[in-house]
Amino acid sequence: MTSHKMKGLICRECGKEYPAVSLHVCELCFGPLEVQYNYTEIRKHITRRSIEAGPKSLWRYLDLLPIEGEPTAGLYAGLTPLVRAKNLGDELGLDTLYIKNDTVNHPTLSFKDRVVSVAITRALELGYDTVACASTGNLANSVAAHAAAAKMQCYVFIPHDLEAAKVLGNLVYRPNVVEVEGNYDDVNRLCSEIAGEHKWAFVNVNIRPYYAEGSKTLAYEVAEQLGWTAPDHIVIPMASGSLLTKVWKGLNEFHKLGLIDRLTTRINGAQAEGCSPISTAYKQGRDFFKPVKPKTIAKSLAIGNPADGYYALKATTESGGAMESVTDDEIVHGMTLLAQTEGIFAETAGGVTIGVLKRLVKQGVIKRKDVTVALITGNGLKTQDAVIDAVGRPTRIAPSLVQFQKMFNLGKHEGTLHD
C-alpha cells in the first residue's frame, strides 16, 4: 500500500495546505512545511505483523514514509541494532539502558543514511537528476554515496574546517565538493540562494519536508525492537533539532495507529556547550533561541541557527523531557566511555549523547529503573582526531617473551583459562 497515504504538505504554523511538490516554506506566512498523511487510509493496511514481514531495512515502514511508489534509493539503510548496554548502564546507574547503534548504518555509517534514502527516492519521483546539500559532514557523505548509486549529478557544500575523514568520505564518491569559507549557517544560506537559481533537489532545502521524515524510522525501530513498546526516556543529539522532533512524531504516529499501547516517553535533547542554542533556551525557560557562533569539537552538531529549534523545544516540553549540554572534555569522555564499556566507537555527536545521558542520570531526571535509549548517530572512524590525545599510545617492546612479561608484570602462568 502506498497510494493515497500522502495528503500533501501542510504549514506547521498557519495550516495552509499544498500538494506534495518540492516546496519547503509556506507562501502565506513563511512557516516550514511538513508532510501530511491520511492516517485513516494507513490504518487499514498497517499492522505489527505487516511491518515484521517487510524488508530488513527502514523500508518496512513504507506506509508511513512520504514516497508514492516503491523505494529506489538506500534499500539497505536502517534496522540497525538496538544494543542492551549492560556495562555502560552499570557504570551510570541504570538497570535497562539501550544504545540505538547507527554507527553501522548502510552505506555511510550515520543516521543520515535514513533521511537521504527517503529524500533521494522522492527526488527521483519528482523528476530531478541533480541532488545537492548543505552539510556539517555526515549528510554530505550520505548524499554523495546515494547519488553515486543512483547515477545522479551531485553537489555537496561543506564548511571549510571539516574533519579530514569526512572530507575524504565525500571526495571518494566523486561528487562536486564545495568548501565554503564560513560555518554551517553560512553554507546553508548560500545553498538557499543556489536552490532558488538552479533546478536541483537540495535535500535539506526544497526537498526538506520529505527528507526530514526519514528520521522517524529511528523511533519506529526502537519501539519495534523493544517488543512494540515505547521506552521511558530517549536521549537525542541536536543540531537543527529536526531529529528530535521527528522521533517524537514517529512515536506519536505508532501510538495513534495502535502499534504501541502506551506513550509516556520523555524526549531529551543533547547539545555541545560550544553550540547549544536550543538547550540554552530550554534551561532559561524561553520558547525561542538566540543564534550562536559554533565553537566545539562536535562539528556534526555545530548549527548555530537551528531550523527546527522551536519545534524541538516544543517536543521536549510536550513529552516532559529535558535538555542539557556538555563540554568538549565531557564529549571525549563520553566517546571513550562508550567504547570501553560497550565496544562501540561513536563520533563526537555520540560523545555528546553519552555525556548528556550521564548528566541527566546524575541530576535524577533519568532514574535507575527507567527504560532508557541513547541514540548514537555516527561512527567514530569519522572523527578520530577528537580522541587521539585521550587514548594513549601502544606499548612498544622488542620481540621477546621475557620483555613482554616484564613490561606487564606477568609471572609464568598468570591469566586463567575458561573451559
Image: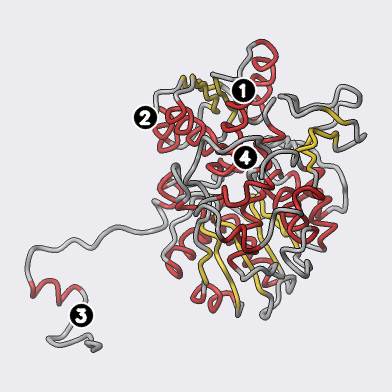
Residue 412 sits in which quadrant? bottom left
- Compare marks 4 and 3 and give the one earlier in the sequence: 4
Q: Dot 3, how many residues are within 10 Å of its Cα: few (below 14), some (14-19), or many (20+)?
A: few
Q: Dot 2, how many residues are within 10 Å of its Cα: few (below 14), some (14-19), or many (20+)?
A: few
Q: Dot 4, how many residues are within 10 Å of its Cα: few (below 14), some (14-19), or many (20+)?
A: many
Q: Secondary structure at mark 4?
A: loop
Judging by the rendered image, the residue that carries numbered circle 4 is 302
- Compare marks 2 and 4 and give the one earlier in the sequence: 2
Judging by the rendered image, the residue that carries numbered circle 1 is 201
Q: Amino acid at mark 1?
A: Ala
The residue located at (59%, 20%) in the rendering is 128
Q: Amino acid at mark 3?
A: Asn
Residues at marks 2 and 1, CA–CA distance in whole angstroms: 21 Å
Residues at marks 4 and 1, CA–CA distance in whole angstroms: 23 Å
- Compare marks 3 and 1 and give the one earlier in the sequence: 1
Residues at marks 4 and 3, CA–CA distance in whole angstroms: 45 Å
Judging by the rendered image, the residue that carries numbered circle 3 is 409
Q: Amino acid at mark 4?
A: Ala
Judging by the rendered image, the residue that carries numbered circle 2 is 172
| Residue 136 as seen in the image, left or right of residue 234 | left
- Compare marks 2 and 1 and give the one earlier in the sequence: 2
